[in-house]
Image: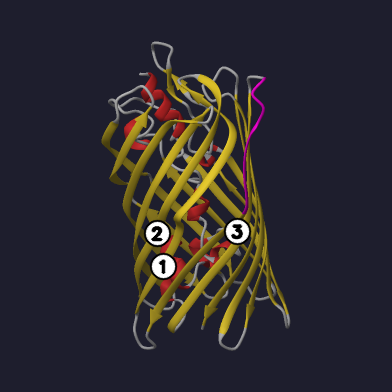
């Protein structure tokens, strides 16, 4: 049981940076604070609403580069252990895509590629983590190789109605290590791959509004895990994992005048998961109920057109957590750690974004800056007791041909 709890604690996040900032991609959406259901364009639409692939003519290439500074801090509820810190001065987030929409065709096609790790190694020193229910100060090391590859298709019924479908191949592989007192205590290799479908629909009423709808059905996959722990037999296993059903709706105004407003709401259905389904590293034996949370997010924003400059954009975004504070089983032992070292997805997250869309003769450029703040508090009676905080400063540039 001790071995299972050690692995559960270390890998509840699956990797050093599994927080869904890796799903926060594409300049056409990020310049609007992530409101991609109505605002994504080109290959970016594959990730948010594939119906938007039909917007534009010919072959449109798009590139997004957003170097970011990331800081993560964990303050244990128990005194005497100090704080755990992860600092990444420069995290280069990049995505590339294209869309193809022939002049007289009602069909459009798209491609998207997002590298999220190319053998990238992150090392963290003196980080307090819970091993089998006890806090210990350890050095952590993670090496990650991951990418997302998307293909999409859309159909334009008329000037008002559009429909699209996309498939995203999400590949992830990592090696994580825990080092205690200079000696390697635990090494875990894990890999996962999903094919994630997404449906999108857009309705536009000229000079009034545009509304978009997104649906991501639940999908399952197999997750491999190999673990070597000092003083224990190696573990080699496959477990089932899943991505939840996601519903989303977005709306933006299209009135006469320089001012417009936009908004978006998304809902992720997590609560029907089990230990094994939600994250195979949380439990290696059987299924058990967990403290999962249905995740909500919303975005509100305004735009202002400036003659000779372009369209300025300001937005506020909120992303809710999908995990609680952790739970105990009937025997009083830790069953689920909830928040843990590097588990960014379990935090409440806020974005404040300012951006500019500027059109040129042959391209559309997007400039944006985001302040991202995320926090989570687990009470002293919970297995993941302590205060968790994440701060990200993101500066981005997007380029798209037209």
Q: Which residue is mark 3?
A: 33
Dot placed on the residue nearer the N-terminal end, 2 or 1? 1
Sequence-first tag of 3 and 2: 3
Q: Which residue appears at 56% of the width and 75% of the height?
A: 399
Q: Is residue 203 visible?
A: no
Please tell me how crowded label 1 is: few (under 14), some (14-19), or many (20+) other residues with Cα within 10 Å.
many
Local secondary structure at mark 2: strand
Q: Which residues are magenta?
A: 80-89
Q: Nearer the viewer, residue 335 or 2?
A: 2
Tell me where residue 124 appears, x and y as whole percent.
57, 40
In the rendering, at what x and y percent does residue 73 appear? Answer: 64, 37
Characterize the magenta stretch by its predominant secondary structure.
strand
| Residue at image mark 2 | 148
**Residue 256 location (% of width, % of height):** 65, 76
Whether residues under marks 2 and 1 lie with C-beta atoms below 8 angstroms apart, the answer is yes
Label 3 to label 2, Cα distance in Å?
Answer: 21 Å
| Quarter location, residue 48 | bottom left
Q: Is residue 373 left or right of residue 17?
A: right
Q: Residue at x 40, y 46 (%)?
A: 174
Q: Quadrant of residue 93?
A: bottom right
Local crowd size for mark 3, using a 10 Å CA cut-off: few (<14), some (14–19), many (≥20): many
Magenta stretch contains residue 396:
no
**Sequence-first disc among 1 and 3:** 3
What kind of element bears circle 1? Answer: strand
């Amino acid at each position: 049981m001790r071995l299972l709890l050690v692995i559960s604690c270390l890998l509840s996040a699956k990797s050093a940076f599994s927080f869904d900032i890796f799903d926060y991609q594409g300049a056409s959406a990020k310049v609007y604070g992530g409101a991609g259901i109505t605002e994504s364009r080109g290959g970016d639409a594959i990730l948010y609403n594939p119906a938007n692939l039909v917007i534009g003519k010919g072959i449109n290439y798009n590139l997004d580069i957003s170097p970011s500074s990331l800081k993560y801090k964990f303050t244990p509820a128990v005194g005497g252990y100090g704080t755990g810190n992860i600092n990444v001065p420069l995290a280069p987030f990049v995505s590339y895509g294209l869309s193809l929409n022939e002049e007289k065709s009602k069909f459009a096609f798209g491609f998207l590629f997002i590298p999220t790790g190319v053998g990238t190694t992150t090392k963290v020193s003196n980080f307090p983590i819970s091993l089998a229910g006890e806090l210990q100060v350890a050095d952590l090391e993670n090496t990650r190789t991951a990418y997302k590859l998307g293909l999409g298709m859309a159909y334009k019924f008329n000037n008002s109605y559009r429909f699209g479908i996309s498939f995203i191949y999400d590949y992830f592989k990592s090696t994580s290590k825990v080092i205690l007192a200079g000696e390697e205590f635990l090494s875990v290799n894990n890999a996962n791959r999903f094919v994630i479908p997404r449906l999108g629909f857009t309705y536009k009423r000229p000079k009034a509004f545009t509304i978009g709808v997104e649906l991501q059905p639940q999908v399952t996959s197999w997750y491999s895990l190999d673990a070597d722990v000092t003083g224990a037999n190696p573990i080699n296993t496959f477990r089932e994992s899943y991505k939840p059903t996601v519903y989303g709706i977005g709306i933006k105004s299209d009135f006469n005048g320089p001012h417009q407003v936009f908004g978006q709401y998304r809902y992720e259905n997590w609560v029907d998961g089990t230990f094994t389904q939600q994250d195979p590293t949380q439990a290696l034996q059987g299924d058990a109920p967990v403290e999962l949370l249905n995740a909500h997010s919303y975005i509100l924003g305004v735009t202002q057109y400036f003659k000779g400059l372009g369209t300025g954009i300001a937005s506020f975004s909120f992303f809710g957590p999908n995990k609680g504070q952790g739970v105990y089983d009937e025997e009083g032992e830790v069953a689920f750690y909830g928040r843990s070292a590097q588990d960014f997805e379990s935090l409440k997250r806020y974005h404040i974004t300012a951006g500019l869309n500027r059109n040129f003769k042959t391209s559309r450029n997007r400039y944006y800056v985001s302040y991202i703040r995320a926090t989570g508090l687990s009470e002293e009676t919970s297995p993941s007791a302590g205060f968790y905080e994440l701060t990200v400063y993101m500066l981005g540039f997007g380029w798209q041909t037209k």
